[in-house]
């Protein structure tokens, strides 16, 4: 699997994009920066998008992507919790502000087809095994683990913790994309919003190590760019103290498993 980090932040600016990933050529994880990071040809190659939760920075580009690719004849499968898909169809693509691409261009061959998945469910998408894992956040949310015959990768999505199920999963991911939205001095804010900081990540990893769990390579995303320098320095300290590899992501970084 090839993984391209389309966005590594929680806000879009001139230099940053919403957290979003492309796996191989045809599968995306979340949809917050598909329009701004993919060429027209790359947009036309998408066949499926896994959605972690309903927050706008993770769904935003689906209406525009629908408009941009509605004539290519490809129905894109959208996979997520029923709560996520319900918010998407009732608020973002309800036919008022944007066309209902679950019915357009035609009801028989719509742009998007909704596929509800539950936590713990294993399913096949874009030729890969996929598993949804519930995570604690301020909206119903899941992360995903993807497995090919070459290995597995995991994405927590937005989460305030709950890393252990990813670390212990039978798919054995060798790469774990984790959010660290805020700096450690904003820990209360992070707890209230269901996000992680380097200090909270340290607690999760130290507890897992204490139980003898091995930690894969960790890629940090969804950073608040206003405090990114501090977050990166703090992640470096966690990495050195625990002996765990932690790489803060940048836009367009690529990985292979
Ligand atoms: Zn969120
Ligand atoms: Zn988010």
Image (cartoon, rainbow, N blue to C red):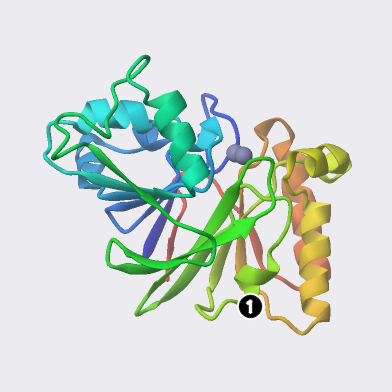
Q: Quadrant of ligand 1?
A: top right
Instruction: Tell which of 5 and 31 is nearer to you.
Output: 31
Q: Residue furthest bottom?
A: 212
Horizontal side of residue 69 vs 190, given as left or right = left
Above or below — where is 185 with respect to 25?
Answer: above
Residue at the spot of label 1: 168
Residue in view at x 87 percent, y 40 percent = 188
Instruction: Tell which of 241 and 224 is nearer to you.
Output: 224
Residue in view at x 58 percent, y 76 percent = 169
Horizontal side of residue 18 vs 61, given as left or right = right
Q: Position of residue 220 (x, y in %)?
A: 63, 53
Above or below — where is 249 with respect to 139?
Answer: below
Q: Is the C terminus in the top left, top right, bottom left or bottom right quadrant?
A: bottom left
Q: Is the N terminus in the top left, top right, bottom left or bottom right quadrant?
A: bottom left
Q: Position of residue 68 (x, y in %)?
A: 23, 28
Above or below — where is 180 with respect to 257?
Answer: above
Question: Looking at the rendering, which quadrant does residue 74 occupy?
Answer: top left
Question: Looking at the rendering, which quadrant does residue 2 occupy?
Answer: bottom left
Instruction: Tell which of 182 and 139 is nearer to you.
Output: 139
| Label 1 element class | helix
């Amino acid at each position: 699997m090839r993984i391209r980090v389309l966005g590594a932040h929680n806000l879009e600016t001139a230099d940053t994009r919403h957290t979003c990933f492309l796996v191989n050529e045809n599968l995306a994880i979340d949809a917050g920066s598909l329009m701004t990071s993919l060429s027209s040809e790359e947009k036309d190659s998408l066949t499926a998008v896994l959605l972690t939760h309903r927050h706008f920075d993770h769904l935003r580009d689906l209406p525009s992507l629908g408009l941009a690719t509605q004539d290519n004849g490809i129905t894109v499968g959208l996979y997520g919790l029923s709560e996520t898909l319900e918010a998407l169809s009732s608020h973002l693509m309800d036919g008022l502000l944007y066309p209902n691409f679950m019915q357009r261009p035609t009801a028989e061959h719509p742009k998007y087809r909704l596929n509800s998945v539950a936590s713990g469910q294993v399913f096949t998408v874009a030729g890969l095994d996929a598993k949804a894992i519930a995570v604690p956040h301020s909206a119903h949310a899941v992360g995903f683990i993807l497995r090919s015959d070459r290995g597995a990768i995991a994405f927590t999505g937005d989460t305030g913790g709950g890393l252990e199920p990813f670390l212990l999963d039978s798919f054995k991911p060798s790469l774990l994309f984790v959010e660290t939205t805020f700096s450690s001095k904003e820990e209360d804010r992070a707890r209230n919003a269901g996000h992680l900081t380097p200090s909270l990540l340290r607690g999760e990893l130290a507890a897992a190590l204490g139980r003898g769990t091995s930690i894969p390579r960790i890629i940090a995303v969804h950073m608040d760019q206003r405090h990114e320098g501090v977050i990166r320095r703090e992640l470096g300290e966690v990495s050195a103290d625990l002996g765990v590899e932690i790489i803060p992501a940048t836009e367009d970084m690529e990985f292979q498993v």
